[in-house]
Image: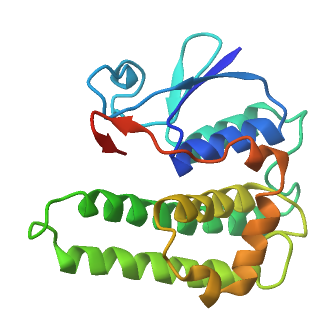
Amino acid sequence: MLRLISATPSPYARKVRIALAEKRIPFELVTEVPWDSTTQTPQYNPLEKLPVLILENGKSIYESHYILEFIEAKYTDVPLLLPKNDVDGALFAKQVEVVADGICDALVLLFFENQREDGKRSEEWMARQRRKVDGGLKALADWVGDKQFFVNDNFGLADIAAGSVLGYLKVRFPGHPWRETYPHLARYSEDLEGRQSFIDTMPRPQKISDKIV
């Protein structure tokens, strides 16, 4: 059986968990705290990042976008996450993933910058990350409009990526006004959170020493 090393609040790990669930691929979930001194993450990923998918032969693969590409290419007899015989649709889905991951990157940087003591935070740095978040959210809102899903009215990769970052926003930045600014995006997010794969992967904070990470 596949093993997935995951961190519960991670939007990147949630992407993979949702994809495996939607494709009905059985796996064992191993929860890690990659910033903790006891982490085993470096044994499986030289970049010391999660998620990591360990294959049945013991080989490990990492980076959420590559893991999703891997399982999409290898597991073709289960529901596909990219539209078949639609190159433009598949490329658009990947573009949505790029923007969603970029929002995630900026949010994670903001979160850790916020952990610094007063007077040690870089307001210029934080402002730049906020611009990335706001620009990315506007792009997602414009693309999804009043549609149920991003590509061809079918759930897929783009929705996994967008839904994961919106869920992360709710957990880590509950005061962000994106719901009021983009009501169609808020509706879209709420609909996704009703899917079983999203219910089962609801992000939860983890602790490292006395800090929430």
Work out whether 197 lies above or below 45: below
Instruction: Residue at 30%, 43% (x, y): give it.
Output: 211
Instruction: Residue at 88%, 54% (x, y): give it.
Output: 84
Across and down, in percent, residue 4 comes to 59, 26
Quadrant, the C terminus? top left
Q: Point out the residue furthest to the top here.
A: 57
Work out whether 34 lies above or below 160: above
Q: Quadrant of residue 147?
A: bottom right
Quadrant, the N terminus? top right
Q: Quadrant of residue 95?
A: bottom right
Q: Quadrant of residue 97?
A: bottom right
Instruction: Residue at 65%, 12% (x, y): give it.
Output: 56
Q: Nearer the viewer, residue 69 or 172?
A: 172
Query: Is 159 placed left or right of 117 in the picture?
Result: right
Query: Is 45 placed left or right of 16 in the picture?
Result: left
Q: Point out the residue furthest to the front here.
A: 210
Work out whether 87 lies above or below 206: below
Give the colour scheme shown. rainbow
Q: Nearer the viewer, residue 188 or 171?
A: 171
Instruction: Residue at 90%, 69% (x, y): give it.
Output: 153
Work out whether 56 lies above or below 93: above
